[in-house]
Image: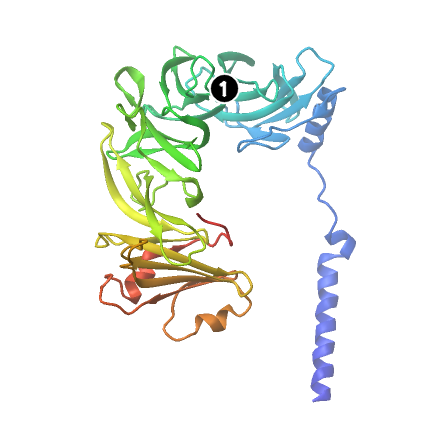
Amino acid sequence: MGKRVLICLALLLGMMGLVGCEFGSVEEMYALPKSSEAYVNLQAKINQEKGNAEYIAPLSGENRQTIQLVDVDGDGAQEAVAFFRDITAEAPLKIVIFKQDDRGEYQAYTRIEGVGSEIESIDYLDLGGAGGVDILVGWQVSTAVHSLVGYTITDGEPVEIMRSGYSRYLTADLDSDGQEEVILSQAGSSNSPTPRIEYYDNREGMMELMSTAPLSDGATDISSWQAGLLEGDVPALFVTSFFGKDVLITDVFCLKQSNELKNISCNSSLRHSESLFHYYTGVQPEDINEDGLMDVPVAKAVASYGDSSVDGFWWLSWVNYRADGTKTVVMTTYHSGDGWYLEIPDSWTGDFSMNQQESSTIGVRTVTFARGLETDQESTVTPFLEISCLTGSDRTRQARESGQIILYSDTAAIYTAQLLPGDWDCGLDEKSLVDSFHASASGWDTVG
């Protein structure tokens, strides 16, 4: 036995010696790679351009690197884009694009200057300008003032193709012409308190304001917005805003004839969308049933019963919109603050109530579904389903208790369920319950 150990040790030492010969010393293995000549040249040009300025980077968006490589002029080769701020200059902010010459050396190709304190964002896209790609820059003039400017590079010079103040912006191809359009949100004012959406499209090389449309009356700050598809694969914009206390509202916009932007979700008599849902559900519009179309949540209140740790619950009806504003419910769900949701079967009609019990000491939170309601006079509540999130150190043993169905588990939590005995058949068995359960564990949050 001892001889075999010595032989193994000798082999191990021999292998270590071979590795050392092949790859060199530890210092060599951890040394930084030598820079290419092109990189050294680029650094020199950037430092030369920098002067007394400081390096900065865009604050938000997908492009936040201090040096970005992008094919600006459409010749198939990437240019280098660098960002500077010189507070002593009349135009403190500067974007410099460096292009390689015939010898492979970088030279300053063009410069874009702006007034403000920060470069909020930069996007490279096809807006239909005359150059290779168009450049959309958000200049932060002050904390409250932002200016969005679009440029196209023509003959090595930036040509301005749009300029507007904005609260938020995004780009999307709403008219399906293969080019991006610019959509801005503008905050309400004392004269017009309702925020509005502005739609810009390319006309003869310039981005022009084509149409505006208001958000729902009562909508305030935008929580999120995104482009998606309506039924019939019609492009649309889904804008979710804060609306009153603890409520979110989603407005849906699409283009009508002559590029007119319309809020197709707005109820003309109410003057706001009926797509309301509770803030604490933690959801936004999404393709909930994965059919390629965007679905919008609409909340329905479900009462609590017994000694519940929360006073009320919310089920969500997910709806598809059509371009004419009509809509169809595609699914109903209950979303928990524990990172899971349950598809509610279509057969669950009538009155329902729910209960939540939790213990942070043992790491268990249980949500119970019940048929019937509880009032001051009587209770017709009949519990039929429990779903638990187990996060404690003893969760594996807890999950193995008799009658528990394992729905999902990961390194942070185990989700279990139990179908309770009773007179009402909820239509779920172990397989359909597992199929109806969806988890993306997000922690131990508070719901309400």
Q: Where is mark 1, residue-wise?
A: 166
Q: Is residue 100 visible in the rendered structure shown here?
A: no
Residue 253 coordinates in the image, percent (x, y): 33, 26
View extreme (front): residue: 377
Name the residue nearer the viewer: 194 or 141.
Answer: 194
Residue 417 coordinates in the image, percent (x, y): 37, 65
Q: Is residue 33 left or right of residue 321?
A: right
Q: Is residue 115 left or right of residue 331?
A: right
Residue 140 coordinates in the image, percent (x, y): 59, 21
Which quadrant of the rendered structure holds the N terminus?
bottom right
Residue 354 coordinates in the image, percent (x, y): 35, 55
- Disc 1, SS: loop
Residue occupying the point 25% across, 54% down:
345
Q: Is residue 14 visible in the rendered structure shown here?
A: yes
Circle 1 residues within 10 Å: few <14, some 14–19, many ≥20:
some
The number of numbered discs placed on residues in the rendered structure image is 1
Reply above or below: 383 against 80.
below
Residue occupying the point 72% across, 17% down:
87
Name the residue nearer the viewer: 144 or 13.
Answer: 144
